[in-house]
Image: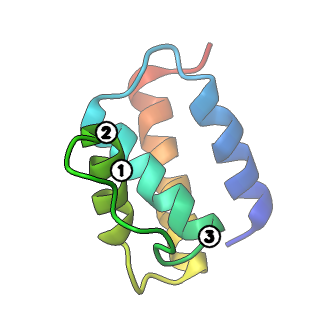
Amino acid sequence: MCDVNFDKAVEDVKNLKQSPKDDELLEIYALFKQATVGDVNTAKPGLFDLKGKAKWEAWNGKKGMSVADAKEAYVTLVNKLVSNYGLK
């Protein structure tokens, strides 16, 4: 997987005509973090931080996925979202 494709997908996701659904946004976030940071390296957010907890859990669900696989999955997902929502 070429980093150029990943970088283009990162830009494309910012230019979708409409915002993806919440579950799609969580998947985008989780794959991006796994591709750029690797496995979760922060403590799980507290009980009252529902958004932070959901993001952490989505990212933690990618634990063990290689950076290359995460980038490839991210590009595939963004391409799907571009075909569904279009670009500005």
Q: How far apart, in angstroms, are the residues tagged by discs 2 and 3?
A: 19 Å
Amino acid on which the number 3 mark rests in the picture: Val
**Is 88 drawn above or below residue 67 in the view shown?**
above
Furthest-right residue in this view: 4
Q: Which residue is mark 3?
A: 37
Q: Which residue is mark 1?
A: 55
Amino acid on which the number 2 mark rests in the picture: Lys
Secondary structure under badge 3?
A: loop
Q: Residue at x 36, y 58 (%)?
A: 56
Foreground residue among 39 and 27: 39
Instruction: Find residue 7 and name its label.
Output: none
**Is 30 drawn above or below residue 84 in the view shown?**
below
Q: Earlier in the sequence, mark 2 or mark 3?
A: 3
* Location of the N terminus (image quadrant): bottom right
In percent of width and height, residue 61 lies at 29, 70
In percent of width and height, residue 68 lies at 60, 78
* Location of the C terminus (image quadrant): top right
Q: Which residue is mark 2?
A: 51
Q: Residue at x 64, y 34 (%)?
A: 12
Q: Residues within 10 Å of mark 3 (few under 14, many from 20)?
A: few
Marks 2,1: beta carbons within 8 A: yes
Q: Tell me if residue 72 can be seen.
A: no
Q: How far apart, in angstroms, are the residues tagged by discs 3 and 1?
A: 14 Å
In percent of width and height, residue 46 lies at 28, 53
Q: Earlier in the sequence, mark 3 or mark 1?
A: 3
